[in-house]
Structures are given as C-alpha cells and as structure tokens.
Image (cartoon, grey):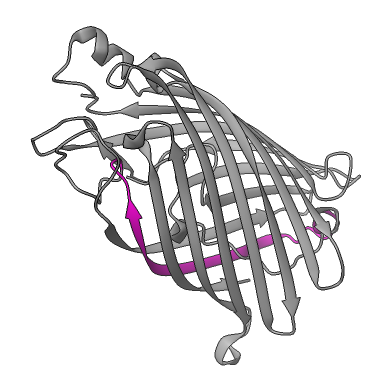
C-alpha cells in the first residue's frame, strides 16, 4: 500500500514552465494533446503500514526496519479539445483526494473570459492494497484490496490568472476489514477504516520572471471513517519553485500538513496526531539526445510523518528517473 503520505518516488512532478491558464484557455487547440511518461525508481522507507514492509510485528512500537521498494510507474495527462471550447480530459494524479495516485476522467469548458470550469469522476481503476489488520502481533499479516472512487469539480483562472479551486468527494472501502480482529467487537468497530472523504484545494501559479515560476497550494480534508479512531480532519500546504535555464529545468518543492483524529485510539488510549513534512528536488533536461518534445527527469525526495503514537511514524527517501513525451 502507498500510505497517506506518498513516497517520494510517486511525486514524479516537474512541468516545464507553461503559459498561465488564461493563455491556455484562449489557445484551446482541437484534437488530442498532452503528455505521457514512464518513470522508474527506488525508495527506502520505515513504516508499519506499507505492505511492502514487514508482514509480522512483535509489538506496537515504531517501525524498526528499513525496507526498499522499486517501482515502474506510467503517468499521463491527456485532453481532447473541440472547436466549441469543450474538452475531455484524463489524468493520473500523484496524490491528493484519495491519499494515493489516482486516475480522473473528466470534462472542461473554456469560458470566453478565460475561466475554465470542469468536473469528472475518479473511477478507482488504479489498484491499491493495505493490511487487513495492521495491528496483528506475532502472526503473518494478510493484505486486503482497497476500493476507492469519487467525483470532483474544478474552477481554473478564478478571479485572477493561475488561481485554481478544487472540491471533491471520495469513498474508501477495505475489502477485508479485520482491524483489531483479536480484540473485542467494540474495539474493532472503533478501528473500521471504510470512509467518506471530503477534500478542498486552492492553488495558484505565479510567474516571477521569464524563467521562474512559483506555485502555492493549500488543502483541507475531512476523512469520515466509520471508526472514530480512524476519522480525522486537517490540512496543509506546499510551495514549488521552478526555473528554466536554456534546456535545463530545476524544481524545488516543500510541503507540510497536520491531521487530528476524532476519537481515542483503543490500542494506545490516546487520540492520534500526525505532522507531515516533505521536500523534493527535481532536475529536467529538455530534448535529450535531440529527441523533440521530450523531457528527461531525475528526482530526489523525502517524506516524514511524525505521529504522537510511534506506531504510525513513517519516513521515506527515494530517487526516480523518467522520460516524458509531450504532443
């Protein structure tokens, strides 16, 4: 499972500096356009929740073993525009609404003033898994599929160029929910992870110069799990600075988030609190080997979840390389 805080390998994010969205709205080109990419990398992590980690626990302490994970990940951002300002879109997102990489299928309409309204569905086609009972001790933990789906609405160029708003609703269902299976029925009910998720995000791209762009993001989340110990609210933000220097592109991103849980965790007799920090450094080289419309990307990333309950502490460092083709 990819835990709530995506491993650095999955951030996979560096776009070339692009025109602000109002220019994109005015220049909507009929036909298929976008980009597709393939990334590969490795991450090294400490986590009791990642299903690539240890499947047997001796106690409910913090993670004690460092594990490695290699991944090959396809990513795309595609659109098909019509001459009458309508647009169909499909995109793989690195993180956000569902706390993991997810696919969206949607529709956008470009208004004459530059504002773009859109909406769509999150069909839940990207597979995910988690531990059926993350807290089981002294025996091999089994995995369970996680089914996620949802819907979203977007507004781009809202009030000013580059300002974007997103609201979304999602559902998370654990196919074989067995949390606390060795405990009483009352405790098991407090640990149920099936949830309704409400998410909001506001971001803006700011052009600092011909070569520099700054993007800020703020988000809020209400995760209404069936069990009080698994329900939480919170939010956070991120800053990303990107620069283009000839064929060289450099990106630096830092993020933070804070989440507070509703009920006391029955296995620790305290409410859970998570403080999350992340950082990544990305380098891109345009047209490697003189291949037109391509971008080679290398990235280093770090994620850390500092929880007041040591069992939920997580840390990961990762590196990834990839090649993206735009058309």
Of 151 and 7, which appears nearest the observer?
Answer: 7
Which image quadrant for residue 152?
top right
Residue 314: % across, % down: 38, 45
Which image quadrant for residue 311?
top left
Of 327 and 226, which appears nearest the observer?
Answer: 226
Residue numbers of the magenta segment: 24-49
Whether residue 187 is in magenta: the answer is: no
**Residue that protrudes farthest toward the right in the picture:** 113
Q: Quadrant of the N terminus?
A: top left
| Direction from residue 282 to residue 147 in the image, left or right | left
Residue 193: % across, % down: 35, 24
Residue for point 81% across, 73% down: 211
| Direction from residue 26 to residue 187 in the image, left or right | left
On screen, residue 14 above or below 80: below
**Residue that protrudes farthest toward the left in the picture:** 139
Residue 176: % across, % down: 22, 27
Q: Is residue 64 visible?
A: yes
Q: Is residue 5 visible?
A: no
Which image quadrant for residue 209?
bottom right
Residue for point 18% across, 10% down: 184
Q: What secondary structure predominates along the stretch shown in magenta?
A: strand
Number of labels in the image equals: 0
**Residue that protrudes farthest toward the top in the picture:** 186
Residue for point 61% across, 65% down: 14
């Amino acid at each position: 499972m990819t835990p709530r805080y995506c491993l650095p390998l999955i951030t996979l994010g560096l776009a070339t500096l692009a025109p602000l969205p109002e220019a994109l709205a005015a220049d909507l080109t009929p036909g298929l356009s976008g980009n597709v990419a393939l990334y590969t990398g490795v991450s090294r992590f400490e986590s009791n929740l990642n299903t690539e980690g240890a499947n047997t626990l001796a106690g409910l302490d913090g993670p004690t073993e460092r594990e490695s994970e290699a991944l090959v990940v396809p990513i795309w951002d595609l659109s098909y525009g019509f001459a009458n300002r309508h647009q169909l879109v499909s995109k793989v997102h690195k993180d956000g609404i569902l706390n993991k990489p997810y696919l969206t299928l949607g529709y956008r309409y470009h208004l004459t003033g530059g504002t773009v309204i859109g909406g769509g569905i999150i069909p839940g086609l990207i597979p995910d898994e988690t531990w059926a009972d993350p807290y089981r001790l002294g025996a091999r933990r089994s995995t369970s599929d996680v089914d996620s789906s949802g819907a979203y609405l977007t507004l781009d160029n809202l009030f000013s160029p580059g300002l974007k708003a997103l609201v979304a609703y999602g559902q998370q269902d654990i196919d074989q929910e067995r949390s606390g299976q060795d405990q009483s029925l009352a405790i098991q009910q407090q640990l149920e992870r099936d949830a309704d998720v409400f998410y909001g995000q506001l971001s803006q791209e700011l052009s600092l110069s011909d070569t520099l762009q700054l993007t800020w993001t703020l988000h809020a989340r209400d995760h209404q799990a069936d069990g009080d110990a698994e329900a939480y609210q919170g939010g956070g933000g991120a800053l990303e600075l990107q620069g283009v220097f000839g064929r060289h592109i450099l990106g630096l991103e830092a993020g933070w988030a804070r989440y507070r849980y509703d009920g006391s965790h029955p296995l620790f007799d305290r409410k859970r609190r998570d403080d999350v920090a992340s950082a990544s450094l990305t380098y891109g080289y345009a047209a490697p080997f003189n291949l037109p419309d391509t971008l080679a990307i290398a990235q280093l990333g770090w994620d850390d979840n500092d929880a007041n309950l040591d069992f939920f502490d997580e840390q990961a460092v990762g590196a990834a390389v990839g090649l993206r083709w735009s058309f």
